[in-house]
Image: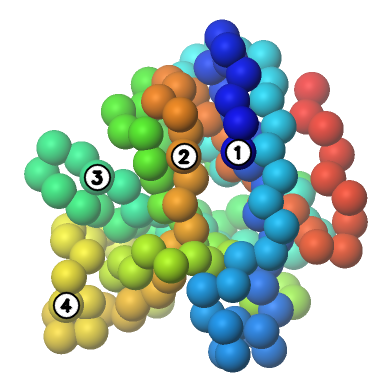
Amino acid sequence: MSTTAASSSSTSLFQPVPVSLRRGAAGLLLGVVAFFAAAPARADLRLCNLTPSKVGIALGYRDAQGWVTEGWWDLAPKGCETLLRGALAARFYYVFAVDYTRGGEWNGRSLMCTRDSEFTIRGVEDCLARGYDRNGFFEVDTGEQKSWTIQLSDPNQPAAPQP
C-alpha cells in the first residue's frame, strides 16, 4: 500500500475467501486495493460492507493493557459501522469477518481469540485452552492516521469509489 500526504482517512478493500478456499488455505486473502479520501468531520475506525451479504465483524487491537479482541458487529449489506470512536491510538488493527449470507470469510495470518457470541477477550495466547476459538485476522495498517475506514468488497463486483 502507498499513502498520500495530508490524508486523515484511508480506505482498504478486502475480498472474502470462499469456504472451499479457506479450508485449504486459511491464510489466503484475496485482492487488496487502497483508496484515499478526504478527512471526515470526526476521527473513528469504521468498517463498511460493500457486499450484498450480511457480515459479522471481529476486531483485534493493542491498547495500554495489551491485546484485545472484540466482536461481533453485524453489518447489513451496503452498511457501515463505527468500531472504535475517537482518534485512533494505534497504527495496526486486525479484522476477521464472516459472510453470513453466502459463506466464506475475510481472514489473515494474525491469530487471535474469538467466540461465537458477543465478546471482549484480553490476550491472544492459548485461545483454545482458555475456551475460545482461534481465527486468523488480517492486518490493517492505518499509517498512524487518526481516522480510518475499512471496506469489505464483494469479489464479484468492482469497487465503487467513496465520496
The residue singled out by tag 4 in the image is 126
The residue singled out by tag 1 in the image is 1
The CA span between labels 3 and 1 is: 22 Å
The CA span between labels 4 and 3 is: 17 Å
| Res 122 quadrant in image | bottom left
Which mark's residue is nearer the viewer, 3 or 1?
Answer: 1
Q: Earlier in the sequence, mark 3 or mark 1?
A: 1
Vertical placement of 40 versus 122: above or below? above
Residue drawn where x is 80% and y is 62% of the image: 155
The CA span between labels 1 and 4 is: 32 Å
Is residue 157 in sight in this rendering? yes
The CA span between labels 1 and 2 is: 9 Å
Mark 1 neighbour density, 10 Å: few (under 14) some (14–19) many (20 or more) = few
Q: In the rendering, which numbered label is found on residue 141?
A: 2
Q: Earlier in the sequence, mark 4 or mark 3?
A: 3
* Secondary structure type for disc 4: loop
Which mark's residue is nearer the viewer, 1 or 4?
Answer: 1
The amino acid type of the residue labelled 3 equals: Arg
The residue singled out by tag 3 in the image is 62
User: How many numbered discs sit on the rendered protein?
Assistant: 4
Q: Is residue 85 left or right of residue 147?
A: left
CB within 8 Å, label 1 to label 4: no
Residue drawn where x is 40% and y is 25% of the image: 144
The CA span between labels 4 and 2 is: 25 Å
CB within 8 Å, label 3 to label 1: no
* Secondary structure type for disc 2: strand
Q: In the rendering, which numbered label is found on residue 29?
A: none
